[in-house]
Image: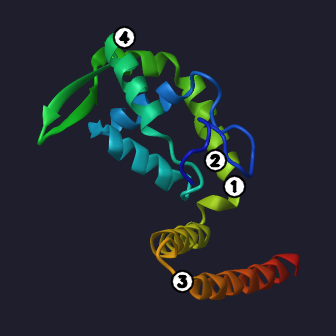
Amino acid sequence: MHGHRFGHSPWQGRIFRKGDFKYMILDMLKERPRYGYEIIRELEDKFGGLYVPSAGIVYPTLQYLEELGYVTGAEKDGKKVYTVTDEGRKFLEEQKETVDGIHDSMKSWCGAHSRDEFHELMHGMGRLGKLCFSNGRAATPEQVKLVRKVIDNAYEEIDKIFKK
């Protein structure tokens, strides 16, 4: 799932419009202080694993918000933890309509993807991908052939389920 261009999914259109991401980060920080990796993981969770913002988007956005005076960053246990400032809260409140629109857009983008069952399905797909990647490079040609056959069979079976 990693490596999508910012705001895009291979299955549907844009999640965020240009400039929307800063509102999401501020909104998350309004709830409690967080560090960058935590923001990445929580957004991945909100999207059921279908969208994972990259560090190359999150950290520059945090730096930008810090430059604007909307957040502060402080070292804690070797990590930089970000906290929204009063000025950031005020900005967020002034942009409430925009933030609400982004939340509505996220809900419609996720649709059925927010269901627990779908989240677990995507988690299982991720586990399968990691298993194949971590073991496949050292596998024998025969092992790769057998795994490929299992995956091809699973694809056919899953396709039948979705066509019912």
Alpha-carbon distance for marks 3 and 4?
54 Å
Earlier sequence position, callout 1 versus callout 4: 4
Residue that appears at 84% across and 83% down = 160
From the image, tell me which residue sits under label 2.
107
Which numbered mark, 3 or 2, is in the foreground of this view?
Answer: 3
From the image, tell me which residue sits under label 4.
68
Residue 29: % across, % down? 34, 34
Alpha-carbon distance for marks 1 and 2?
6 Å
From the image, tell me which residue sits under label 3.
140
> Could you say whether the residue bearing mark 1 is in a helix, strand or loop?
helix
Q: Which amino acid does label 2 sit on?
A: Lys
Q: In this view, does 139 lie to the left or right of 163?
A: left
Residue 111 is tagged as: 1
Q: How crowded is mark 4: few (under 14 residues within 10 Å), some or many (20 or more)?
A: few
Residue 91: % across, % down? 43, 15
> Could you say whether the residue bearing mark 3 is in a helix, strand or loop?
loop
Cβ–Cβ below 8 Å for labels 1 and 3? Answer: no
Residue that appears at 70% across and 37% down = 14
Cβ–Cβ below 8 Å for labels 1 and 2? Answer: yes
Q: Is residue 118 above or below residue 17?
A: below
